[in-house]
Amino acid sequence: MDWLTSLRGAIEYMEEHLLEPVTPEDIGKAVNISPFYLQKGFQIMTGYGLGEYIRCRRLYMAAMDLLAGDEKVIEIAYKYCYQTPESFAKAFSRFHGFPPSQVKRQRRRIKIFLPLKITITIQGGHNVDYKIEKMDSFKVIGFEEDIPMERGYELCPKMWDRLTKKYFSALWQGKTPETDLERAIVENGVGAFGVCVEGGGDTFAYMVGGTYKGGPVPEGMKVREIPAAAWAKFCSAGPMPEGMHSLYTQIFQEWLPGNREYDLAHPIDIEYYECIGDGMDYEIWLPVTEKGKG
């Protein structure tokens, strides 16, 4: 199943299950994509997280039901998978701008949210720059946090900012490491990688790390093993984090829909950073298998 077909299938699945509890794992299984890549790609392609899309569709349909019928608010709340009428009313008011009890008086203010249709428009004449490189397994060490999928573009740069102010800035300017943690940062090149790994539900684990060369793992750090794989490596340069976000968009909106050779493999991707003079070069690595061989 190709990338666009899978995304369209995900929308169809969500539409068919608006009245049932649905998880990213359920949707990913239905369209044969890991929840990690499905959530990441869906948000990049549509601007909505999976949970956000389902929530918006339910709240629109709930308004239509309240407008058209005699169902009570409590019945509509449970119908659309809210645990209490209060939580439904709060979500409804935040989405539409008025409480569910006022639907018939405020019908012109109902926020319309129809099913999405995914299409691709080809713009420009350049190809996405990438290469395929096979690599043995290796280990990374660094600082790791669980990040909500829908807030990755917001929280990952903030994590980098905190670590840069606390550790990296002084060490990169030549400060002599004084603690086990600072020594581990310098010895393992922590700051070269941003590693995204499938988490649970609607979160992913994000590590700011470097290549682990052995030795003690200081408190506050973690070691992960990266599996052997063929990696599609996409290269770019420019200001951060905007440049990295733009590269992700290029990959998911241009390369994946047009790619006929490779499928995504393990639910992981890696950002690689290298300072060149006063600028920054960076890459995104995606593990892939040849189509039909995964």
Image (cartoon, helix red, strand yellow):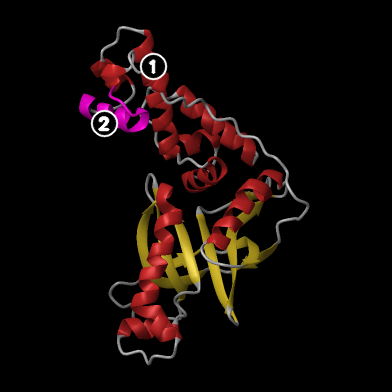
Image vertical order of residue 257 relative to residue 248, above or below:
above
Residue 90 included in the magenta stretch of the image: yes
Whole-percent x and y of residue 13? 50, 28
What's under tag 2, amino acid-wise? Lys
Which residue is found at the position 33% from the left and 77% from the top? 166
The answer to which image quadrant residue 173 occupies is bottom left
Percent across and percent down for residue 124 are 75, 50
Residue 205 image offset from top left, x and y in percent: 40, 57
Q: Which residue is mark 2?
A: 90
Q: Residues within 10 Å of mark 1 (few under 14, many from 20)?
A: few
Label 1 element class: helix
Spot the residue most to the right: 125
User: Which residues, given as a range, are shown in magenta?
Assistant: 84-99
Q: CA distance from mark 2 to mark 1?
A: 18 Å
Where disc 2 sits, the SS reads helix
- In the picture, the disc for residue 107 is 1
The answer to whether 81 is drawn above or below residue 274 in the figure is above
